[in-house]
């Protein structure tokens, strides 16, 4: 039995304790960074949502994937939650001067990522390979994996009509009511061999505190992904992105409500019923333990809010501890 | 008879005095800017060399075309002679951090041009159309025309082997001896309708002081271009890029020598024999008048060096004056 509960310091440098995390954007990236800090180098793989990817000015942009990559590389912009630290927007200003609607804030450094990714994809490389190359150069110690290599596009049904995800999320500031979610291209998506391997060799699987509808949802919707996870017998623990009835960041709470889900930690837990064994909630949501337990999950109550870097590692260690109890 | 020799101030606002200029990079851009300043708005078309275009990191880059565009828009970097003024290189630094060899200095603002051009070309627009769109937004009053819409690539034979033009020009700093010039794709190139129209409706045609081998040479090599020019009966005047036996900028002098041409104003004039009627040389080269006259050209001796903006307009007016004498 792997004892995740021991002092994690002792794991450092010891290869073989594999953890796989499923992550969306900011919240997922934070816990992934905590896990990377808590585990020995090379022992973490992260499967990231790519259904929010889109094309802008001919460039392939992968917002969630990049947020995780920059965060794990230690170069993420801490203030904005997206993009690279110490960023400038001079190319964007020129693009805007050329008459383009510069609603998506592409930084100059960030642009380098998109330019090289687009070039490599056009040359025939898979997104998995391109991501591995970029992340390695940035010094990411973990294995960052797109959920699939095929393009998938989250499209939201709103009272204003269908909106592409980034249009809803960035351009329109998440102000539209989400009445439905469509994952275009998901039927053609396949679980990449690297993801399959990452999940198969994992000794614990963590569902990061990301939006269950548009971040974790698309990952689980890749054909074969759900089976791969349910067939795995290792501890699977989800961390609630809803704390005190509200999303820590982003529109998850409003989205859950408009889609008919309960806006609570238990509401999210219900969406993972039959897949995860354990659920981590914030102390604010301790009273939901009974309801979540009724779903067949063990519950861990802790401080689930990651305010700073020490918080990330603390929560990661708590989650890993919890996993070890579920082995 | 059009009197180019009158006070050009009176031409301002008066449409119909069309001048067409053939231009390469920096030197050509300077005289084009002088012509634009001297002529009424909208009365200048510039046919620019695109045989130095290339692909870098998946982006289509048109160095000569952009130098002319930025110069005519008044946003060119005066110090470097290429790129945009008040430029930064933050995307390039990141591209370099990703392990790419950042030998071509792509500025952040400049990058916007390449990103949008590449997107529009991929969407099926012709380079002529893309250029018109970008130039218009930048406020270019003249009609900037690529010599052709098809990709043409100047390839140089050197003792080190074949080199792509920008590799020779930028990466290797023009240090290689040029033993031969090949214009790849030139057979498939066609004179765009806009260029044909620009030349046909021109009342004077100016060969800017650009490299006759790799700037004006490719323009003349587009199938049909030479005939279009020789069939035109309007004054055609070339300005020598060689002053006092040396190129004002760039490797034209060494290139002429290694390719077996005479490195002098007369040497350049000989390359335009049968096409141009008039040749403008610097006072330093006044003694070449007899030799150039023997080629059937009228010669105008003046200060052919453009040190600053007033110089550009002064030379442009001199050239236009000279044209009016040749009508």
Image (tube, coloured by chain):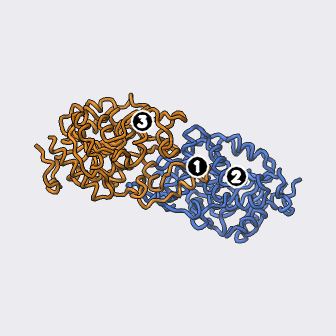
Chain colours: A orange, B blue
In the rendered image, residues at marks 2 and 1 fall on the same chain? yes
Q: Is residue B295 visible?
A: yes
- Name the residue furthest top: A187
Q: Is residue B52 visible?
A: no
Which residue position holds label 3?
A: A151
Mark 2: few, some, or many residues within 10 Å (few <14, many ≥20)? many
Q: Residue at x 59, y 59 (%)?
A: B256
Q: Looking at the image, which is closer to me, B228 or B72?
A: B72
Residue at mark 2 to residue at mark 1: CA–CA distance? 15 Å
Residue A293: image quadrant is top left
Residue A256 pos. (x, y %): 40, 38
Residue A265 pos. (x, y %): 31, 41
In the rendered image, residues at marks 3 and 2 fall on the same chain? no
Tell which circle, 2 or 1, labels the residue nearer the N-terminal end.
2
Foreground label between 1 and 3: 3
Foreground label between 3 and 2: 3
Residue at mark 1 to residue at mark 3: CA–CA distance? 35 Å
Query: Which type of secondary structure does the marked residue at label 2 adopt?
Result: strand
Kindly check if marks 3 and 2 are in contact, taking CB atoms under 8 A apart as contact: no
Which residue position holds label 2?
A: B46
Mark 1: few, some, or many residues within 10 Å (few <14, many ≥20)? many
Q: Residue at x 87, y 57 (%)?
A: B3
- Name the residue furthest bottom: B284
Q: Could you say which disc has been placed on residue B51 in the image?
A: 1
Residue B215: image quadrant is bottom right
Kindly check if marks 1 and 3 are in contact, taking CB atoms under 8 A apart as contact: no
Q: Looking at the image, which is closer to me, A174 or B323?
A: A174
């Amino acid at each position: 039995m792997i004892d995740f509960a021991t002092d994690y310091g002792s794991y450092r440098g010891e290869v073989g304790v594999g953890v796989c995390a499923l992550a969306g954007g900011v919240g997922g990236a934070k816990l992934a960074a905590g896990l990377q800090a808590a585990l020995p180098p090379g022992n973490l793989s992260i499967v990231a949502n790519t259904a929010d990817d889109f094309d802008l000015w001919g460039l392939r942009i992968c917002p969630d994937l990049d947020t995780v990559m920059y965060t794990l590389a230690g170069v993420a912009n801490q203030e904005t939650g997206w993009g690279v630290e110490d960023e400038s927007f001079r190319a964007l200003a020129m693009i805007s001067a050329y008459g383009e609607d510069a609603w998506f804030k592409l930084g100059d450094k960030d642009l380098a990522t998109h330019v090289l990714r687009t070039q490599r994809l056009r040359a025939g490389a898979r997104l998995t390979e391109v991501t591995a190359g970029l992340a390695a150069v940035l010094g990411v110690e973990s294995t960052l994996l797109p959920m699939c290599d095929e393009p998938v596009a989250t499209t939201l049904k709103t009272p204003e009509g269908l909106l592409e995800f980034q249009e809803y999320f960035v351009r329109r500031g998440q102000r539209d009511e989400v009445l439905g979610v469509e994952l275009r291209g998901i039927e053609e998506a396949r679980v990449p061999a690297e993801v399959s391997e990452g999940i198969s060799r994992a000794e614990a699987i963590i569902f990061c505190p990301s939006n269950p509808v548009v971040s974790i949802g698309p990952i689980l919707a890749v054909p074969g992904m759900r089976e791969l996870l349910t067939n795995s017998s290792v501890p699977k623990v989800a961390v609630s992105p809803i704390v005190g009835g509200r999303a820590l960041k982003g529109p998850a709470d409003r989205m859950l409500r408009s889609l008919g889900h309960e806006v609570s930690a238990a509401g999210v837990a219900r969406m993972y019923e039959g897949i995860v064994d354990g659920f981590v909630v914030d102390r604010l949501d301790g009273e939901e333990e009974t309801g979540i337990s009724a779903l067949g999950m063990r519950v861990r109550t802790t401080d689930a809010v990651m305010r700073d870097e020490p918080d990330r590692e603390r929560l990661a260690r708590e989650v890993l501890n919890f996993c070890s109890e579920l082995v």
